[in-house]
Image (tube, rainbow, N blue to C red):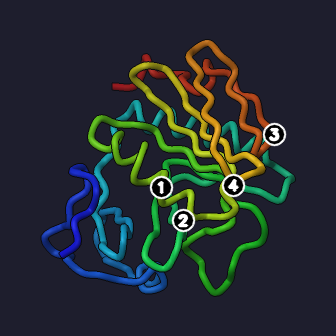
Amino acid sequence: MKQVDSMAYQLPTATAMRMTSDEFLLWSPNDDKRYELIDGHVIQMTTSIDRHQTVAGNLWAEFRAHLRGKPCTAYMALDVHIDESNCLVPDVFVSCGTADRNRPRGKSNVPLVVEVLSPSTAAFDRKGKFARYRRMSALREYMLVDVEKLATVVHRRCEDGAWEIFRYSAPAIVRLASIGLDIASDLIFADLERAA
């Protein structure tokens, strides 16, 4: 069996199966667990902590308000269709255009993806997930948010296909060119003192 490139992701004992993306997006496991498809393997996701969810919620709310009335929408924790063997579930992402009625799950026209880092998944989010997200031609920015350091890294695709890296620390203003939004770090990290 092919090894997945992160110790944070392990094949669940009940689902050591392989699928295509189309099969995965039609699959309904009938349990309360969340899954991703990584290189054809069904992978059980880890559970987020309060601080992680607080930051993801802050970003989703800001994106949603900013995009209201525009052809793009912000989502939390939904499937993103990468290719024939990968469907990932970002913490927050933006999808543009009309929905594909033939595929109710698995958004694909995604210019912005956000992952909120946690100790168990940070290495994979930085490398393995980013490598897969980059396969999407629509992707313009990949944002990593470090809740512990109150820092943000934005990877932005240049016209020539190369990627620039922009690093921000609170209280900086984070520029998201893909959706035309400048967002204050104070808003990104708001209410963390109330989260566990």
Q: Is residue 27 left or right of residue 22?
A: left
Instruction: Point out the tag, 4 or 1, that comes first from the N-terminus.
Output: 4
Tag 2: residue type?
A: Val
Q: Tell whether label 1 touches label 4 (CB within 8 Å).
A: no
10 Å neighbourhood of mark 4: few (<14), some, or many (≥20)? many
Does dot 2 land on a helix, a strand or a loop? Answer: strand
Q: CA distance from mark 2 to mark 3?
A: 21 Å
Helix, strand, or loop for circle 1?
helix
The one of 169 and 132 positioned closer to us in this rendering: 132
Residue 131 circle label: 1
- Of all residues, the one furthest to the left in this rendering is 13
Mark sitting earlier along the chain (1/3) = 1
Separation (CA) of disc 1 from disc 3: 24 Å
Mark 3 lies on residue: 180
Q: Quadrant of the C terminus?
A: top left
Q: Which residue is mark 2?
A: 80
Q: Amino acid at mark 3?
A: Gly
- Give the mark nearer the N terminus: 2 vs 3: 2
